[in-house]
Image: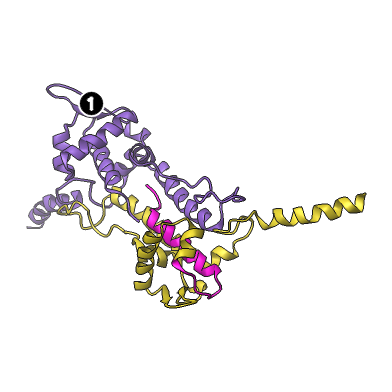
Chain colours: A yellow, B purple
Amino acid sequence: MIISQAVEYSLRAMVMLTQSFEEPVTVQAMAARGQIPAAYLSKLLQGLTRARLVTAQRGVGGGYTLTRPPSQITLADVVNAVEPLQRIKKCPLGIAGHATLCPLHRKLDEAMATIEAAFQATTLDDLGKDTGGPVPLCSTEPIVAINLKMKLPAVNASRG
Amino acid sequence: MIISQAVEYSLRAMVMLTQSFEEPVTVQAMAARGQIPAAYLSKLLQGLTRARLVTAQRGVGGGYTLTRPPSQITLADVVNAVEPLQRIKKCPLGIAGHATLCPLHRKLDEAMATIEAAFQATTLDDLGKDTGGPVPLCSTEPIVAINLKMKLPAVNASRG
C-alpha cells in the first residue's frame, strides 16, 4: 500500500511551482528537476489544470503557475485532483443489512479519514515553512553544510 | 489513493477464516461469500501462506485455516503479506544532501506511519469484538434487528 507515483509526481510539480515565486515553469524544467517523465507530467498537469490548481501560459516565457497562493492549496487538493482519496461510504460488498459499515470497513475508512485530515491540514506553503531538513527537490547540499564550508577557511586563517 | 483491491480481498479472506472457528474453509466458499474472483483469491492465499498467516489442508474436508489465533494476527500482518505498507526511508529522488527527508516526503511518510500504527494496533480478533454495527461479510440483517423481531411477539403476548 503506497503513495502512488501519480500522487508523488503531482506533489513534486506543485512544490516546484510553489518555489518558482509566481514565475511560469515549463514542463521540461519541471520534468528535469523533478525526475518525472515529461509526457507523464503533461498528463498530470492536465488534471491539475482541470482542478484549477495550475494554469498554463503559452509562448515565450510561458509555462505553468499556481492559480492561487500556496497557502491556499492543501495536499488534499492536489491528491484529490489526481487520484481522489477514497473514503468508504457504504459496504463494498453491497450486503443487505449493512446500512452502517462493519468493523473491518470502518477501520479501513478510519485510516483513510486520518490521511485525509492530515492532507487537508497541510498547505504547500507549510512545506516551505518547515525547517530543520533539506528543501524539497533542491539538488544542492543542505544550506547549513554549505555555510559551514564557507566559514571554515576563515576560522583556519584566524588560527594561523 | 485507495486501499487496493488485493488488500481489501485479503482482509475479507482473513475475516472469513477468523469467523470459521478453526474449521477449514475452501477457496470456493471464500470466493463466493467474499465476492472475490476465485483465481485471484488463490493467488492472494499463496502470499498469505508464504507469510505463514494461513495454511492449507488438502483432501476432503480440507481448506484454509489461520496458523495462529486471530488475536495474534494484526491488520498490518495481512497488509504487509500482500502489499507492504511502504514507508519513505530516504529521498525518492536520490538528491545529494538529502540525508534526512524533506518536508514533503516527511509529511507523506507520516501519513504512512499513522496507517501502519493503526493497522498494527488492530487484530482480526478486535474486528469481531467491535460492536454496534453489522458483522463483516455476514449477509444477514444485523443481529440486533433479528433479536428485536424475535422478541416482539412475546412482548405483545404479555401485553395482551
What residue is rendered at 26% in x and 50% in y? Answer: A102
Q: Which residue is mark 1?
A: B56
Give the image quarter of residue B48: top left
Residue shown at 46% from the left, 71% from the top? A73
Q: Residues within 10 Å of mark 1 (few under 14, many from 20)?
A: some
**B17 w.r.t. A144: above or below:** above
Estimate the x, y position of residue B141 in percent, counting from the top left: 15, 51
Residue closest to the far top: B59
- The answer to which of B5 and A110 lies nearer the viewer is B5
Q: Position of residue A46 (x, y in %)?
A: 35, 69
The residue under the point 35% across, 35% down is B71
Q: From this view, report whether residue A30 is shown above or below residue A60.
A: above
Residue A117 or residue A47, whichever sits in front: A47
Residue type marked 1: Ala
Q: Secondary structure at mark 1?
A: strand
Apparent side of residue B2 relative to residue A35 in the rendered image (left or right): left
Q: Evaluate whether residue B120 shows in this view.
A: yes
Span of residues in magenta: A1-27
The chain ID associated with circle 1 is B
| Residue B131 visible in the picture | no
Q: Is residue A72 left or right of residue A2?
A: right
Q: Looking at the picture, how far across and down is residue A77, in whole percent?
A: 41, 67
Which residue is at 50% across, 76% downward? Answer: A61
Query: On the rendered structure, is B146 left or right of A27?
Result: left
Residue A17 left/right relative to B10: right
Is A20 inside the magenta-drawn segment?
yes
Residue A4 or residue A119, whichever sits in front: A4
Q: Quadrant of the N terminus of chain B?
A: bottom left
